[in-house]
Image (cartoon, rainbow, N blue to C red):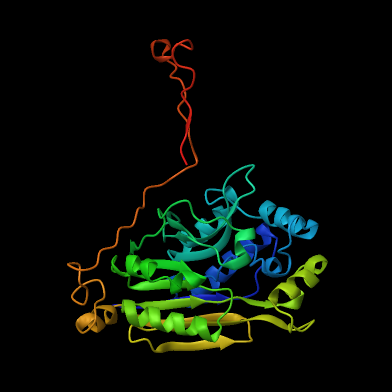
Amino acid sequence: MSSIQVAIVQEPPAILDLAEGVSRATEHVDAAAREGARLVAFPETWLTGYPAWIFGLAGWNDPEARRWHAALVSQSPAVDSVDLDPLRQVAARNQITVVMGLNERHGPGSGTLFNSLLTIGPQGQTLGVHRKLTPTHTERIVWAQSADAAGLRVHDTDIGRLGGLVCWEHWQPLIRQAMHDQGEQIHVAAWPDMTDAHQVATQSYAFEGRCFVVAAAQFVRAEDVPEQFRDAYRTGVGPDTPTSGVWFPGGSAVAGPDGRWVTEPLFDVAGTVHAEIDIEQTIAYKQDFDVAGHYSRPDIFTLTVDRRPRASVSWVDASEDPAEVPNPSTSRAEATRHD
């Protein structure tokens, strides 16, 4: 059988609370697995929350912006952190694939964050980490752009070829083509919300790539935001945001390879969206349109994607073998920096 069930978690995140967020995530994965899901997707930065306050705190040297940035960094994990072990364990226990949107910390002592998608396989293994290549607008106050395209990959899994992008990456045609070229069959689109434009992007991506798009959007109410920065968060969401009620209304949905909805967007309620998808349709619909195959023109257009991992510093340490230790009189430094 080529049909599988996918699930999208549209439940409130635990904003600025990593331990609680991981606990909720494991419960949601367990529940989705009991319903037969083979894939569970979470929205953009669901783990520790979407920092909407940035849109109202963009001034230079703003003490409130510094305060909330420090709080967010302290509650954001590195992808190899033991804090994420329960998430790996629940994936392995249920033999399920999990795609989690999270605020990723660059490493211990770092104040740098990435807007990332972590993909965990059914044995609890890390399949990949995609860092948003270019944060949008004032998001750049919080998130760094990815240093490379090492995570721009489609993974060969037991449920099909799986990839994912974050938010407005879906409007970047070269990124889309790079994903389509890898034979993507299931695509996770992580959004903070599902505006009309985001619905268009979701359905367009599905049609263009002849793939299923699992679109995950945040559901956040006023009471889900820590009281001490609720005003800043509300200001960032928008000037017309009510003082109570729903601030991010969700809208999670699944689009098929014909561009039509498999499940319509779910708005204004918390819950988990389930959908049955038939992977064979991703091949059938390429009969007339395969943008990375018979409908492409490589004799005219070419695209090069550099996926080499990059770092700002390369360390070269002296060997324990005395014969290989450099003479300080002839070699002043063995550490080099590469931009």
Question: Is residue 297 or residue 194 the one in the foreground?
Answer: 297
Q: Identify the residue shown where x is 44% and y is 73%.
A: 170
- Seen in the image, is 185 located left or right of residue 68? left
Q: Is residue 33 something one can see in this rendering?
A: no
- Seen in the image, is 191 located left or right of residue 161? right
Report the residue that reaches farthest toward the right: 228
- Seen in the image, is 73 located left or right of residue 316? right
Instruction: Tell me where residue 330 appears, x and y as whole percent.
Output: 44, 12
Instruction: Tell me where residue 99 appears, x and y as whole percent.
Output: 48, 65
Question: Is residue 270 or residue 338 the one in the foreground?
Answer: 338
Quarter-of-image position of residue 175: bottom left
Q: Identify the residue shown where x is 67% and y is 57%.
A: 19
Instruction: Tell me where residue 284 appears, x and y as whole percent.
Output: 23, 82
State whether residue 185 is above or below residue 102: below
Q: Identify the residue shown where x is 34% and y is 67%.
A: 179
Question: Is residue 192 or residue 282 the one in the foreground?
Answer: 192
Q: Identify the residue shown where x is 80% and y is 81%.
A: 243
Total residue callouts: 0
Q: Is residue 184 something one can see in this rendering?
A: yes
State whether residue 331 is above or below residue 274: above
